[in-house]
Image (cartoon, rainbow, N blue to C red):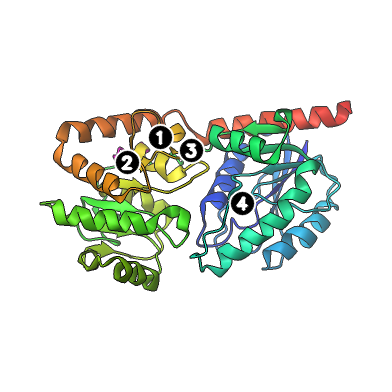
Amino acid sequence: MRIGIEAQRIFRKNKHGMDYVVLEEIKELQKSDTRNEYFVFVAPGEDRCLKDSKNVHIIEIGGNIYPLWEQFSLPRAVSQLNLDILHCTSNTAPIYCNIPLILTLHDIIFLEPRDKSNKSFYQNMGWRYRRFVVPKILKKCKRIITVSEFEYNNIISKLNIPEENMAMIYNGYNEWFKPLEDTEQVFQQYIEEPGYFFFLGNTDPKKNTERTLIAYSNYLKKSDIKRKLLMADLDRGYLEDIIERNHIDNIREQIVMPGYIKNVDLPYIYNNAFAFLYTSLRESFGIPLLEAMACGTPVITSNTSSMPEIGGPEVLMVNPQNANEITEKMLLLETDGDLYKKQKEIGLKRAQQFSWKYTAEQLLMLYEEVYRNRHRD
């Protein structure tokens, strides 16, 4: 097979969730599949994290504006290569494309009501673009992949997609997320002392940053230890608005915000954290949840969307809309040593059920099925 994979953003320096998913899928396919030929379409960038090999070819396409890149530059490049399949990996795809199309639809958050408090231009434009493009391409897709049973059922029920057109393939996590020793030199670039709470909040309302910070304020009032809170890459003005609006000045000196944390440094961050707060309102999968568990870091996560499915029935769960519940679980981990030890063991065991190797195997089987069906037709 000659397989095209859209991976537009993987060369950018500050990658996000979907970028890492497709990057790891391609790396695993590159290692395990030598029979088929892959053409990976990317935009130029400074982090050249993937290299050509005998049967994997990197095709760089210029253009920084994503809609123009996807709707014009990508299909033009694809048309010159006589591909059997094009896999678009980040929720959208070209509206006009004569190659059999597979789409990874991570979620359909773009169909849900938009929080008016979200002032991010980038997030708002992406939301509008997906609302315009996705309905136009769904019927053209030979398969639509999503990443959890929660999202699988959600997509089928809300978009009326026939089950035979759907596939569910779990994400994995990188093998370097594991219990580590001698980690001080790396984590101390970000925070001085170990034993902190770690939270990957941002300005997207679904990340539930405001309630989590209220919960942290309550924790500081009740805890004898008063652990620091490490947060990555959050706008300082956004934080100050939350503090002033909720009168939680006591968190200001306790929060450490070092900016963007490199993915290769995250295992050291998890290993030195007391616990990881993954208290989103909604997630389609939740790779950070797995990463923390694989490092043996206890997790407090939400009882909504995919998080119970990925974290498993024994993970510590809260109602993410109840700040008091988050606070209670933070204090419980701090005061119950047996529970803390048990949660470490639960996480390590649960993470073993996921891997990028298994993800790539499932993906290749799907490619082969679409290819066979095309030639049968």
Q: CA distance from mark 1 to mark 4?
A: 33 Å
Q: State the extent of the magenta-drawn residues as a range.
A: 294-300
Determine contact: label 3, label 2, CB under 8 Å. Answer: no
The residue pinned by badge 1 equals 311
Magenta stretch contains residue 49 = no
The secondary element bearing badge 2 is classed as strand
Q: Which residue is mark 2?
A: 299
Q: Which residue is mark 4?
A: 51
Q: CA distance from mark 3 to mark 4?
A: 33 Å
Image spot of residue 247 (x, y percent)? 26, 67
- Residue in view at x 50 percent, y 64 percent: 118
Q: Nearer the viewer, mark 3 or mark 1?
A: 3
Q: Residue at x 48, y 38 (%)?
A: 306
Q: Earlier in the sequence, mark 3 or mark 4?
A: 4
Residue 299 to residue 204: above or below:
above
Disc nearer the start of the sequence (3/2)? 2
